Image: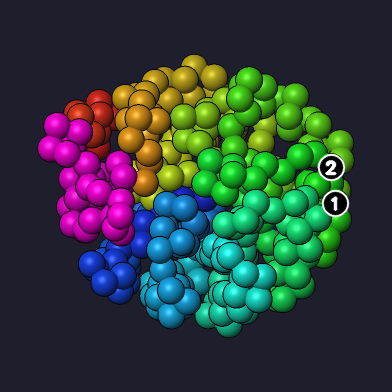
Amino acid sequence: MDLFHGLSAFSLTPTDADGIVQTQALSALIDHIKTADVQSIGLLGSTGGYAYLTREERQRTIHAAVECLNGTIPLIVGVSALRTDEAQALARDAQALGASGLLLSPMSYTPLTDEEVFQHFKAVAQATDLPLCIYNNPGTTKFTFDVTLIQRLANVANIVAIKMPLPADGGFTDEIARLREVTPSGFAIGYSGDWGAADSLLAGCDAWYSVIAGLLPVPALKLTQAAATQNLEKAREIDQSFAPLWSLFKEFGSFRVMYVIADLLGLCSIEPPRPILPLTEPARDRVRQALLHIEVLQ
């Protein structure tokens, strides 16, 4: 399944203060990503603020992105929701509107058991014919997929990939090997957490699900290509140029920083959904300096 391979660039979802998607601004962001030859575009993931949007606004988001892409780049759409029936409906919406694949995380208020997560993912995977990627994001969901649960889910029809968080010990090679041992041939293993992209790609993962590629697709693609060809020196050089930005991602959260970058690049001037607050002017200046470090504003 080539869909969940290579560089996947995740876009912001511009909204107004009432949570209404600004489709013109979204199209501008999608057009910007199209300047690089990314393998896919991710929509309505964490960077896309899916948890802050109604079903109707998610539909508007997908429709606008599909119309803008016109089949040029595959589109992975997040369909996470608190209720299983709601996630199934979102999955059907995504398929009807032209998505290429799905991304699902185990959203919850009440902490979920492994069996509850298994049944939830199985039900959503069976709701459409689209390939589905497991979104293992304990930072937001507070749920961590262990190897046994991943193995079970990897044998469910339509579940063909996983988006992993960065391993705490940095042991990408061992973790990828363990996952490949228990998952079917062709099951795609990718990572998020942009500051670990170089290491995960050099270790042989299948995909980088990238926040920064949603706004800086060209340098992100260069990093991906250098790592994919095992050009260690080049990959480290590019990764080092990103280092000030990675530090800001860790300090403030990539979600907040991305809104500043979009504004500084002149792509759209929007604020994150409340209660998330915009970064202060001193923080914005640090973002500006980090961008200058990778020479995107010169």
Q: Is residue 44 visible?
A: yes
Query: Considering depth in this image, is 224 or 199 the residue closer to the camera?
Result: 199
Q: Within the magenta stretch, is there residue 50?
A: no
| x then y, percent, for residue 138 | 59, 42
**Circles 1 and 2 in contact, beta carbons < 8 Å:** yes
Please state if 68 lies on the left or on the right of 280 as rendered. Answer: right
Other-residue count near label 2 (Cα within 10 Å), few / some / many at <14 / 14–19 / ≥20: few
Task: Locate residue 211: give its quadrant.
Answer: top left
Q: Position of residue 193 (x, y in %)?
A: 50, 36
The residue at the point 20 percent across, 33 percent down is: 283
Q: Where is residue 265 in the image (x, y as percent from the top left)?
A: 20, 47
Q: Is residue 192 left or right of residue 286?
A: right
- Which mark is drawn over residue 152? 1
Residue at the image point whose x is 30% and y is 55% from the top: 275
The quarter of the rendered structure image containing the N terminus is bottom right
Image quadrant occupied by the C terminus: top left
Q: What stretch is highlighted in magenta?
A: 256-285
Q: Residue at x 63, y 41 (%)?
A: 164
Q: Dot 2 lies on which element? A: helix
115 relative to 52 in the view: left or right: right
- Residue ranking furthest to the front: 110
How is the rendered protein coloured? rainbow
Tell me which amino acid carries mark 1. Answer: Arg
Q: Which residue lies under the disc numbered 2?
A: 148
Q: How many labels does the image show?
A: 2
Between residue 16 and residue 9, name the one nearer to us: 16
How crowded pointer 1 is (Cα within 10 Å; few <14, some 14-19, many 20+) is rated as few
